[in-house]
Image (cartoon, rainbow, N blue to C red):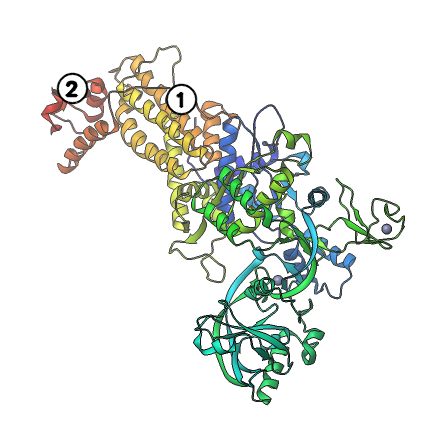
């Protein structure tokens, strides 16, 4: 019996109890496994409202699947590798990768990680998210770390497996280079910004005729890397130049002039200087025309010896100096500011340079078609998100550069024989650091040499994080053999081309199969006006504050209620979250009301059509919710459950059977009375089960106190078929007609009804109607005779 009111404090005891007991430890049993490959958040940022909402939806899925009899694998990874950690450490301890030795640098990163607060984990726990323990994954407290020895050993194993399959190769190619992060980047790590640039019209000379030709460029410092001059085939102005030779100013390099569609009629002067490493189109052009690129920028972001007089200057300095020299010689005829798209590093926002470097590549171009086929085998819960994935596949244009020149990440497990350069592979299953450790062999198998050089490069962070389903499914073990496909990948749309794509690709290259059954790409959370939330805009909402103010379960209810899969984004405001407290109150008050009635098990119950009606309604709701939950849709069922709770059940059924349940004047038989009480408990019980995945703490509290059942251990309810001759419409019609009449006459709802004319079907619930509405006389008529007539 519950005799107190619902408050947000109630859930706290429940949550604390759940944290202490670590109830949901994963066990590899005979039950089928349902696994959720959660996105590992970065440890050094407090979780935001969007993460709170999306992990809460994942928790609803986990709880629902447990109820459906699955052994649910739902761990949380913490992403602790790579640039974000290094950048944070450089800032905090004022170090730089350029002047700190590697051992010390790594120690600083580890120090940073050890000093980080436990806030991420705490916030998730306070939301009641049931991440689970699994000792075999080093998954303490439901968390695993992507920089643990076990995790990094797996990353190295996947590298070695792919290497042995011939899918990884070393090659010197022009590649994206971020001067800020001082490392190679994959195309998927590039963003674009619109920037102002100075567009300089520079005069070149035609060798054969001495004609001066104007070429506009934003990057005059790259004139030293000139490979060709082009104009559009349609451009009448320059047709006479076809096949002639252009001489570059200052550097006096002679190159061919040719028509090519890459030049746009309307852009600049119509003539374009093609320089290696100006932008993407230049790089492709050089490959296509088979011209050897002349790289003039080195990895420190400075001009190299190919840049002649500009050698040693940074790109910006070189651009300035080049403009000065050209101006001195009167070779610039026009300068204007234009806006154009500039590739930038997704992380540090530095402008990307293109440099030629030897890096390890993972083959992906050969497998694009196969990945498209796999995409058809994966079920995307929201169809448009599949398009993001497929669109990315269309633009994959080079293999994936996977090596990085950084320190705090997983090392490439290779050594080289100092004598013959033979490659020595690391040992599988252990974490190895070739930059400071010896190889697994004593002498070179090829030449017998005894000295080795360890590889110093590390792997791209996406090469690490694309292992998450392999890690939680224990790739390489019997558990993986039994469970080679992860059930669900939930994630944000901004990392489809990176995390999702790389995970699908890598698993395919390793196993030849799809790695996910389902992919759930969630929406972004916007403020109530539809604007993106951010700290700087002042419209962000701190999840910690929300929990403190309204309780975790109001937040959870709101998440389910707003998380409509078919909508692009969902809107958030404190008011909306607060209003969900009303729903919790309603459920609690209904339970408190029902709790005052005692069910006498000695008496045979007798249900009337009203009881059968409400039983049918709740059973329909169970079927519908089950089908929707299966598709990770909590929004649509929630709308219906809320309607059932507040309207069908509370406003109509409860009102109509109150007198029967109390039965103070023994107007009803004991059997009839028990029919109502039994149905009250029945409906409440089913509602608790239906709402448990969404609000586990309130529902479980009621369930334990009133039904002595721990919902954490319970199965999703079975359904039973009920038939009723009455529909919701019939019931609403009669109640509303009488209440309306009484309200209009300004009398109390308890006031008598002298006579009411109603159709025959209401005869089934005659006694309930008489007692509820205080009816003195009922006249029955045929269905065809129309509406209800009430006389007070
Ligand atoms: Zn960068
Ligand atoms: Zn050797």
Q: Is residue 12 above or below residue 392?
A: above
Please say whether residue 673 is visible from this viewpoint: yes
Q: Position of residue 284 (x, y in %)?
A: 57, 62
Q: Pointer 2: what residue? A: 760
- Could you say which is closer to the camera, residue 571 or residue 606? 571
Please say whether residue 200 is visible from this viewpoint: no
SS state under label 2: helix
Tell me the quadrant of ligand 1: bottom right
Q: Is residue 35 above or below residue 166?
A: above
Give the position of the C terminus as an image quadrant: top left
Label 2 crowd bin: few (<14), some (14–19), many (20+), radius 10 Å: few
Q: Pointer 1: what residue? A: 719
Nearer the observer: mark 1 or 2; the answer is 1
Whichever of labels 1 and 2 marks the residue nearer the N terminus, that label is: 1
SS state under label 1: loop
Q: Are marks 1 and 2 in contact (CB under 8 Å)?
A: no
Q: Position of residue 100 (x, y in %)?
A: 76, 63
Which residue occupies 21% across, 23% down? 769
Which residue occupies 49% across, 36% down? 61
Q: Position of residue 53 (x, y in %)?
A: 48, 45
- Could you say which is closer to the camera, residue 721 or residue 442? 442
Q: Quadrant of residue 595?
A: top left
Label 1 crowd bin: few (<14), some (14–19), many (20+), radius 10 Å: some
Give the position of the N terminus as an image quadrant: top left
């Amino acid at each position: 019996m519950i005799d107190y009111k619902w408050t947000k404090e109630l859930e706290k005891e429940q949550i604390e109890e759940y944290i202490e007991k670590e109830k949901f430890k994963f066990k590899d049993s005979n039950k089928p496994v349902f696994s959720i490959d959660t996105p590992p958040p970065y440890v050094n940022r407090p979780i935001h409202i969007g993460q709170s909402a999306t992990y809460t939806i994942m928790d609803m899925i986990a709880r629902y699947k447990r109820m459906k009899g699955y052994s649910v694998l739902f761990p949380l990874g913490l992403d602790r590798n790579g640039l974000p950690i290094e950048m944070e450490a450089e800032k905090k301890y004022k170090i730089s990768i350029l002047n700190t030795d590697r051992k010390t640098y790594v120690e600083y990163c580890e120090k940073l990680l050890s000093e980080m607060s436990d806030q991420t984990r705490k916030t998730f726990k306070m939301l009641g998210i049931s991440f689970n323990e699994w000792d075999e994954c080093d998954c303490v407290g439901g968390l695993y770390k992507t920089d643990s020895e076990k995790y990094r050993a797996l990353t190295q194993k996947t590298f070695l497996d792919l290497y042995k399959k011939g899918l990884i190769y070393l090659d010197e190619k022009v590649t994206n280079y971020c001067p800020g992060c001082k490392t190679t980047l994959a195309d998927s790590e590039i963003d674009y910004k619109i920037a102002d640039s100075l567009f300089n019209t520079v005069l070149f000379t035609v060798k054969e005729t001495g004609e001066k030709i104007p070429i506009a460029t934003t990057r005059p410092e790259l004139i030293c890397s000139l490979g060709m001059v082009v104009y559009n085939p349609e451009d009448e102005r320059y047709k006479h130049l076809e096949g002639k030779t252009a001489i570059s100013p200052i550097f006096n390099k002679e190159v061919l002039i040719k028509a090519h569609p890459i030049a746009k009629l309307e852009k600049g002067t119509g003539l374009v200087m093609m320089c290696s490493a100006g932008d993407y189109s230049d790089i492709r052009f050089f490959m296509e025309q088979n011209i050897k690129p002349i790289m003039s920028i080195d990895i420190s972001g400075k001009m190299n010896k190919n840049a002649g007089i500009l050698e040693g200057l940074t790109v910006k300095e070189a651009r300035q100096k080049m403009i000065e020299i050209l101006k001195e010689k009167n070779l610039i005829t026009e300068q204007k500011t234009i806006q154009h798209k500039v590739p930038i590093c997704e992380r540090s926002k530095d402008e990307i340079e293109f440099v030629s470097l030897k890096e390890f590549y993972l083959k992906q171009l050969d497998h694009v078609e196969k990945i498209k086929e796999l995409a058809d085998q994966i079920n995307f819960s929201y169809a448009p998100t599949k398009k993001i994935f497929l669109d990315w596949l269309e633009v994959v244009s080079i293999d994936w550069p996977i090596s990085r020149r950084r320190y705090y990440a997983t090392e490439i497990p290779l050594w080289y024989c100092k004598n013959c350069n033979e490659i020595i592979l690391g040992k599988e299953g252990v974490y190895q650091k070739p930059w400071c450790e010896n190889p697994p062999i004593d002498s070179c198998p090829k030449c017998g040499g005894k000295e080795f050089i360890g590889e110093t490069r590390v792997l791209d962070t996406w090469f690490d994080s694309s292992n998450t389903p392999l890690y939680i499914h224990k790739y390489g073990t019997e558990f993986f053999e039994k469970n080679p496909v992860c059930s669900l990948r939930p994630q944000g749309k901004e990392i489809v081309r990176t995390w999702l794509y790389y995970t699908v690709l890598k698993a395919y290259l390793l196993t030849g199969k799809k790695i996910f059954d389902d992919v759930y790409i969630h929406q972004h959370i916007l403020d109530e006006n539809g604007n993106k939330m951010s700290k700087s805009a002042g419209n962000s909402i701190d999840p910690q504050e929300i929990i403190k103010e309204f309780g975790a379960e109001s937040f959870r209810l709101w998440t389910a209620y707003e998380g409509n899969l078919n909508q692009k984004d969902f809107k958030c405001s404190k008011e909306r979250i607060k209003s969900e407290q009303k729903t919790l109150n309603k459920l609690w008050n209904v339970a408190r009301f029902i709790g005052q009635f005692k069910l006498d098990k000695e008496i045979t119950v007798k249900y009337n059509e009203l009881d059968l009606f409400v039983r049918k309604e709740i059973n329909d709701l169970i079927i519908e919710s089950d089908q929707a939950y299966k598709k990770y849709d909590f929004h649509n069922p929630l709308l219906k459950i809320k309607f059932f709770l507040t309207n069908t059940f509370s406003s109509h059924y409860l009102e109509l059977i109150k007198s029967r349940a109390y039965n103070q004047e023994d107007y009803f038989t004991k059997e009839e009375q028990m029919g109502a009480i039994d149905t009250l408990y029945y409906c409440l019980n089913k509602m608790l089960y239906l709402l448990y995945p969404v609000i586990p703490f309130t529902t479980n509290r009621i369930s334990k106190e009133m039904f002595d059942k721990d919902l954490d251990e319970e199965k999703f309810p079975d359904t039973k078929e009920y038939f009723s001759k009455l529909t919701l419409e019939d019931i609403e019609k009669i109640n509303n007609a009488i209440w309306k009449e009484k309200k209009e006459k300004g009398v109390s709802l308890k006031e008598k009804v002298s006579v009411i004319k109603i159709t025959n079907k209401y005869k089934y619930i005659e006694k309930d109607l008489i007692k509820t509405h205080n009816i003195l006389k009922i006249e029955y008529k045929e269905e065809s005779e129309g509406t209800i007539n009430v006389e007070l």
